[in-house]
Image (tube, coloured by chain):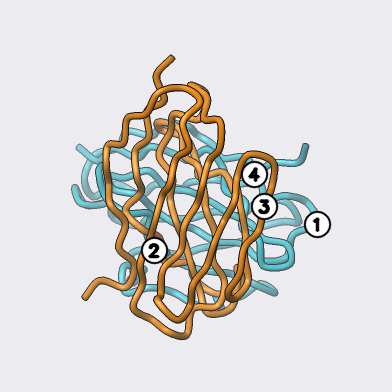
Chain colours: A cyan, B orange
Amino acid sequence: EPEVTQTPSHQVTQMGQEVILRCVPISNHLYFYWYRQILGQKVEFLVSFYNNEISEKSEIFDDQFSVERPDGSNFTLKIRSTKLEDSAMYFCASSERGLLFFGSGTQLSVL
Amino acid sequence: QKEVEQDPGPLSVPEGAIVSLNCTYSNSAFQYFMWYRQYSRKGPELLMYTYSSGNKEDGRFTAQVDKSSKYISLFIRDSQPSDSATYLCAMSDSGGYNKLIFGAGTRLAVHP
């Protein structure tokens, strides 16, 4: 069964460092998303991406964040200068006909 | 008032019980309602998807939407220990083409 793949599963970084989280969406899906979940809190929308551009972003998704689809298969989330409060589980998702399928997530720990 | 409210539990039931999980919401524009299951430190897994009001059944799972009351439910029949997980409701005004708003999740434990 096709699935969304995320790497790495865990990422530890120092405050102020740049991180790139990687995702391979399901191959025939056209819509891509990043969500995050801070420990003990709700899953929150960050950004949606369609046709090589951002279609919607949340207030969380400020200038420190960017997304890119560098080739036909990968979808990345970059955090330019990480803060302690960026520590969370980051989920990539892709959708077909409005149904979202999530990856297993990258646990980001900012020290 | 929060957009989506969901009792976080935990809910503990014996194997074979019928489980009822619920969410309320405030935004009348929501038309698409989903239930996801999340195991510890894993991604949400889509269980059920409903458009507008009504019922939908899939095996042991039944999803209900009452738009007049802004209330959705997920019923699990003949619950199994493998059903132990956190159940998240999610909703949007345009399906997955727009952002999903999630509830806090209800933690369910089914004991043998």
Residue tagged 1: A28
The quadrant of the image that shows the N terminus of chain A is top right
Residue bearing the label numbered 3: B57
Q: State the SS at label 1.
A: loop
Q: Amino acid at mark 2?
A: Phe
Determine the secondary structure under disc 3.
strand
Which mark, by number, is residue A96?
none
- For disc 4, the neighbor class at 10 Å (few under 14, some 14 to 19, many from 20) is some
Q: Along the polypeptide, which appears first: circle 4 or circle 2?
A: 4
- Which residue shows up at 73% across the image and 62% down it? A96
Q: Nearer the viewer, mark 4 or mark 2?
A: 4
The residue that label 4 is drawn on is: A4
Q: Is residue A58 above or below residue A108?
A: below
Tell me how far mark 2 sits from mark 1, CA to CA. 26 Å
User: What chain does badge 1 belong to?
Assistant: A
Disc 4/disc 2 C-alpha distance (Å): 21 Å
Q: CA distance from mark 1 to mark 3?
A: 27 Å
Q: Which percent across, then down, holds residue A59? A: 32, 74
Give the numbered dot on residue A65. 2
Q: Say above or below: A87 vs B14.
A: below
